[in-house]
Amino acid sequence: MWRLLGALLLLLAPAAAAAQTAEIARAIPEIDRIFSEFQQSSHAPGLVYGIVQDGRLVHVKVYGTQDLTKARRPVTADSLFRIASMSKAFTAMAILKLRDEGKLSLDAPAETYVPELKAWRYPTKDSARIRVRDLLNHVAGFVTDDPWGDRQQVITEAEFTRMLKDGVPFTRAPGLTFEYSNFGFALLGRIVTNVSGMPYDQYISRNIQRPLGMASTGYQVTDWTLERRAVGYRWENDAWAEEPTMRHGVFGAMGGVQTSANDYAKWIAFLLSGWPARDDAETGPVARATVREMASGSNVPRLRPRFGSTPVTQAAAYGMGLIAAEDPDLGKTLSHGGGYPGYGSHMLLLTDHGIGIFVFSNRTYNGGSGAAWDAAVALHKAGALKGRALAVSSSLAAGYKAAGAMYRAGSIEPARGLLAMNFLMDRSAENWAKEFAKIRGDLGQCRTDSPVTATGALAGTFRWQCDKGVLEGNILLAPTNPAAIQAFRYTAVPTPR
C-alpha cells in the first residue's frame, strides 16, 4: 500500500503539489463550515468527511456522535459506517478484474454465468438478452427499486436463487435506457460468486480491499465491535429512531460495505491513481486502464443539474459503479451517492486534479451530495483545481520549434521538412509569407521561445509576447510517422492604444 501511495505522490511535480496543498488548506475553513451546517440542518447524529489529494488523506473532519446511547461515543476517522450504494464500485471492479483474468466477458449474456436467467420471459419477442455490461450500466430493463432494494440486504443465497428461478418483471426491453437497479447489482454479485468460486464478500475482501490495506472494511458489520461502529438512525416526528442493523446478504453487492474514513481514503486514492495514463509500474489489484474503464458510461447520456447550491448543467452517464459527468467548472468528475436505512454517503472524484471528497453520516438517506459538490466548488474558487500539465512529446517539441522558426523567417522554408501533405494545399507558401509579414506589421517582433502547453501528444497551445501585443495560437500535428505539422493557427491581439 505504501508503495502505491508513494507512486501517487509523484503524479504532480513537488512545487505544483505543494501549491495545490496550500490552496486546499485555504479552502478548508469554508468546507468545514459547509459540512458542519449540513450535519446540523439534516439532523445527522454524526458525520465524517475527508479530502484526498494524490494518494494522501490531507484533511479529515468529524462531527457529532456515532451512537445516541449513554456512551455517546464521538465520531472519529476510524468510526465504521455503512456506505450503501457507494459499494457498487467494489462490485464493478470485481467484475472487471474477473474479465481481465479471462474468466468472463462483459458482452456475454448474463445467463452464461447465472443459469437461472435462461428461462426468463423477456418483455418483447425482439428483446436483446441481458449482457453483463447492461447490468453494470443499469440498462438491463429492470425497474428502479429504491428503497425496496435496500431492504433486500439480508436475503440469503437460497432465497435469491428462488427469486431468479421465478423470474422478475421487466419495466422495458433491455438496452434502451438507464434505470437504476439494485437488483441488477445483486445479480452481478451472484456472477462474482459463480465465476470466482468463492462467496462474493470473500472475493472482494481478498482480492480488492485487503490488497489496498483496507483492514477495517467489510460486509458483515458484526465482525467489528459495537464500540467501532456508527449506529444508524432515521429522523422522523422530530426525533431519532434507531434502524435495525442488517446482516450481510445477497444484496450486499449493491450496498453492503462498512468502512471508515481512514480506510475509504485508500480506496479513493487507488481510484484516483488511474489518472493520468502513464508508463509507471502497476501497483494495485487491477490495472490503471481497468480503473479508467469504470468511467466508461453507457450509451444513454443525460443532462442533470450539479448537486449543491451552485447548480449548473452537467452531461452525465452511468459508468460501472460510478457516474461520469463533465462539469463546466470542475472538469471530468466521477461520483456516486449512497442511501440506506441508517446511513447516507457521497463520494466525488475530480480526476483532472487528483482530488477526491467523501462524506459519511449515520442518518437514513442522508447522503450529503450537495455538501460534497459545494466543497468541490469551494476548492475551485480557492484555485486548488489546476489540473495536471501534460508532458510535451518529442514530436510536439520538434513541430513547435519548427513553427517558431517559420515565423521568425517569415517563410515556411525552415519547416518544409516537417509539414504534412495538406499544409501547403490549404494555404500556399506565398500566402504564408504575406500572413507572417502582416502579423509582424501588427505586432512587431514576437518572442517564440515561450514553452508550448501540450493538450495531447500531437497538439498544443502557445502564447507569444510581442513588441505590440500578443500572438496566441495552437499547433496540430498529423497522425503520420514521423508526425508532421497539419495546422498552425493563431490570433493576433494588439496592445490597446
Image (tube, grey):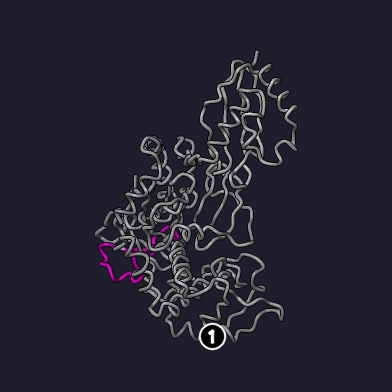
Q: Quadrant of the N terminus?
A: bottom left
Q: Is residue 363 left or right of residue 176?
A: left
What amino acid does circle 1 point to?
Glu
Residue 460 placed where, x, y %? 57, 37
The residue at 52%/43% (across/down) is 330
Q: Is residue 195 visible?
A: yes
Q: Is residue 234 visible?
A: no
Query: Which residue is disc 1 drawn over?
Result: 116
The residue at 43%/51% (across/down) is 279
The answer to whether 267 is drawn above or below residue 20 in the figure is below
Residue 407 placed where, x, y %? 63, 25
Which quadrant of the figure has residue 180? bottom right
| Magenta-colored span | 217-242
Q: Give the class, few, some or many, for how many residues have Cα within 10 Å of label 1's Cα (few <14, many ≥20).
A: some
Which quadrant of the figure has residue 135? bottom right
Q: Is residue 26 left or right of residue 328?
A: left
The residue at 61%/36% (across/down) is 475
The answer to whether 370 is drawn above or below residue 175 in the figure is above
Instruction: Out of 387 and 344, give the one closest to the viewer.
Output: 387
Q: Is residue 243 left or right of residue 111?
A: left
What secondary structure is marked by label 1? helix
Count of numbered circles in the view: 1
Instruction: Out of 87 and 243, give the one closest to the viewer.
Output: 87
Residue 156 placed where, x, y %? 42, 81
Instruction: Out of 281 and 423, give the one closest to the viewer.
Output: 423
Residue 207 placed where, x, y %? 36, 68
- Per the image, is 239 magenta? yes
The residue at 43%/43% (across/down) is 34
- Per the image, is 153 magenta? no
Instruction: Out of 233 and 305, give the one closest to the viewer.
Output: 305
The answer to whether 309 is drawn above or below residue 427 in the figure is below
Q: Quadrant of the C terminus?
A: top right
